[in-house]
């Protein structure tokens, strides 16, 4: 059945058609008619499907086949500079639709730094940016403040990044609601990694014995919870990125972006957080395959840590904290902690669940808590779709 489109529909250009991107396009094309959205471009690292008049006639049942059959781009960009130029040309092409008075959204479903670095260009052309990609908001303060400045300079374009923290869970929107209405954040703490949650919910139940550490890591990868390279999860970088995003969302609220200093925004982003790493020594820089092959050698060490905690009646959980109790000395940290078996982090989490507690002035001694699946294609794409709905 063909989809009809609402007058003045939002034009959507998708970059990144992997796990999350594929599910996102499925959700977009499942939207009931008349759909407020119209796909105008689909791009992977090798293929670009677009139409000079800006519209793609794709349906839920034919889009994947059509994209798979699309020929690879000629003269594929090789260097970072070539990739950036190619991307900027595509964004400039999209800006023609903006000039015609249409709302255009770039949906970045990659984990690519170069794509993330192009957000100021897109926003500058009046193209909205929606993404689950954490790179732009957790990297250098220079890029982050560029994004804030361009987004506030009157082009009317917005950036929305709900799925960068807690996947589809309403974490960013809850935080914006709290700070936007004048509440004071004292501390945000919780289990922020779907991968780490899955691993420790299965690996450390408080009982002796159980699966090997490497087995549960491979299961988390197979389930689509990990980053393309699971070391990004295991070394704490992914949690550090999420904590950086939350911290920056708080401090950039209601402040003129021009007045924010890079030092306030963490000059080097997540690299300043220094999380505890679970990647065994010697496997940090080897190929992904060598890492996977080498991980089982550390199983005994992880089992010992689990048994030591179990002897004290405790379980292991990987937890992150943004502590603003003293706002002049923010503390951002992430690491492997031990919790009693009756603690909320031990009893209430299953699968890839995240649990995030907002301790604020208004909520007093009983924090506002958001909990649920924090990784996986379906829930992540839902968060991206829900951001898109805010613009429709
Ligand atoms: N998986 C999850 O549960 C969650 C993921 N996220 C985030 O969502 C994003 C996507 O994750 P996921 O779908 O799992 O990752 P995948 O690796 O499955 O997909 C990423 C896609 O991006 C494409 N890509 C990479 N670089 C470029 C580029 N320069 N231009 C065009 N396309 C490019 C790749 O194309 P090709 O195949 O051609 O190489 C690939 O298909 C990541 O940023 C991740 O952190 C956020 C929350 C949860
Ligand atoms: N790899 C991430 C995916 C979501 O951000 C995680 O495990 O949480
Ligand atoms: Na979220």
Image (spheres, rainbow, N blue to C red):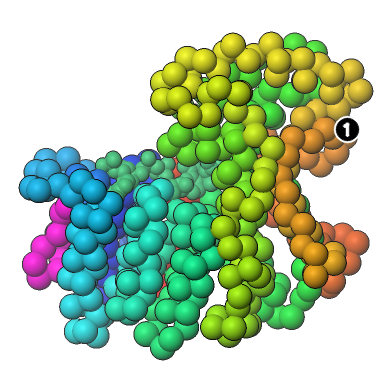
Location of residue 217 (image quadrant)? top right
Q: Residue at x 39, y 78 (%)?
A: 157
Is 49 colored magenta in this rendering? Answer: yes
The residue to which callout 1 is attached is 340
Q: In terms of secondary structure, what is the magenta stretch mainly?
A: loop
Classify residue 66 as left or right of residue 162: left
Q: Position of residue 70 (x, y in %)?
A: 11, 45
Task: Please say if 66 is above or below 302.
Answer: below
Is 181 colored magenta in this rendering? Answer: no
In the rendered image, the residue lying farthest to the bottom is 154
Q: Residue at x 41, y 25 (%)?
A: 287
Task: Please say if 307 is above or below 284.
Answer: above
Task: Please say if 25 is above or below 204.
Answer: below
The yes-or-no answer for disc 1 within 8 Å of ligand 2 is: no
Classify residue 127 as left or right of residue 307: left
Q: Residue 22: in sight, yes or no?
A: no
Q: Position of residue 264 (x, y in %)?
A: 65, 70
Classify mark 1: helix, strand or loop: strand
In what quadrant of the picture does the N terminus appear? bottom left
Which residues are drawn in magenta?
47-57
Q: Position of residue 145 (x, y in %)?
A: 51, 72
Classify residue 172 as left or right of residue 123: right
């Amino acid at each position: 059945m063909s989809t009809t489109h609402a007058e003045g529909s939002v034009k959507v250009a998708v970059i990144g058609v992997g796990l999350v991107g594929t599910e996102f396009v499925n959700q977009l094309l499942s939207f009931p008619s008349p759909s407020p959205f119209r796909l105008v471009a689909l791009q992977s690292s090798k293929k670009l499907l677009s139409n000079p008049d800006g519209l793609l006639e794709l349906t839920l049942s034919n889009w994947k086949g059509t994209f798979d059959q699309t020929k690879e781009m000629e003269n594929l960009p090789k260097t970072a500079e070539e990739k950036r130029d190619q991307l900027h040309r595509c964004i400039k092409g999209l800006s023609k639709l903006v000039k015609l008075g249409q709302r255009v959204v770039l949906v970045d479903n990659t984990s690519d730094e170069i794509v993330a670095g192009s957000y100021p260009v897109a926003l500058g052309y009046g193209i909205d940016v929606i993404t689950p990609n954490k790179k732009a908001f957790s990297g250098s303060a220079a890029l982050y403040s560029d994004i804030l400045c361009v987004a506030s300079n009157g082009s009317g374009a917005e950036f929305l990044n709900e799925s960068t923290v807690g996947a589809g869970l309403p974490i960013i929107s809850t935080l914006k609601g709290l700070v936007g209405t004048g509440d004071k954040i004292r501390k945000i703490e919780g289990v922020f990694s779907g991968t780490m949650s899955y691993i420790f919910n299965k690996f450390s139940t408080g009982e002796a014995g159980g699966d090997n550490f490497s087995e549960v890591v491979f299961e988390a990868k197979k389930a689509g919870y990990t980053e393309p390279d699971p070391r990004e999860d295991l070394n704490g970088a992914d949690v550090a990125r999420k904590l950086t995003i939350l911290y920056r969302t708080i401090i950039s609220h209601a402040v003129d972006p021009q007045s924010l200093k890079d030092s306030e925004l963490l000059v080097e982003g997540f690299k300043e957080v220094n999380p505890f790493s679970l990647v065994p020594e010697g496997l940090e820089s080897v190929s992904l395959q060598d890492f996977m092959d080498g991980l089982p050698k550390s199983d005994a060490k992880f089992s010992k840590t689990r048994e030591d905690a179990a002897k004290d009646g405790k379980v292991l959980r990987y937890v992150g904290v943004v502590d603003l109790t003293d706002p002049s000395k923010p503390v951002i940290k992430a690491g492997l902690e031990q919790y009693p078996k009756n603690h909320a982090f031990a009893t209430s989490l299953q699968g890839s669940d995240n649990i995030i507690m907002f301790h604020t002035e208004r909520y007093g001694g009983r924090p506002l808590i958001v909990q649920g699946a924090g990784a996986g294609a379906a829930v992540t794409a839902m968060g991206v779709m829900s951001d898109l709905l805010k613009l429709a």
